[in-house]
Image: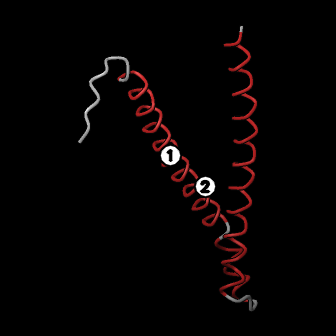
Amino acid sequence: MNIDLDPMSWEPRLYSGLLSTFSILALIIAALGIHGVMAYTVTQRTREIGIRRALGAARGDVQRMVVGQALRMVLWGAGIGFVVAFLSTRAWAACYRG
């Protein structure tokens, strides 16, 4: 095990560790949020899903409908997130350039 005793290297490691920790925490919170929204949506559409099944819709069709809706929400959110991240990175870089 190689232990780096350079006093100048602790700060970048601390920042990268904190960034990694908060990034993982943000991903967990986002996943829980998506799960909560989808659970709420399915609960609101339970009657519709039951009617579809009663009228002959296959279980796979109903699952594809629900998963497709979730996938659309995730893709929209990811797309908006990437655009906001790109623009905020550019804005921060412009601020630090002076």
Query: Which x, y percent locates residue 32?
Result: 51, 52
Identify the residue under disc 2.
Answer: 37
Pointer 1 residue: 29
Choose between 26 and 2: the one closer to the eye.
2
Q: Residue at x 76, y 30 (%)?
A: 87
Q: Position of residue 81 (x, y in %)?
A: 70, 41
Residue 6 pos. (x, y %)? 31, 21
Helix, strand or loop at mark 1: helix
Q: Mark 2 Cα within 10 Å, few/some/many (few <14, many 20+)?
A: some
The quadrant in which residue 84 appears is top right
What residue sits 57% from the left and 62% below the top?
39
Picture quarter containing residue 18?
top left
Q: Residue at x 67, y 13 (%)?
A: 96
Q: Decide if residue 77 is on the left or right side of residue 26.
A: right
Q: Residue furthest front?
A: 2
User: Quick check: 8 above or below 60?
Assistant: above
Sequence order check: which comes first, mark 1 or mark 2?
1
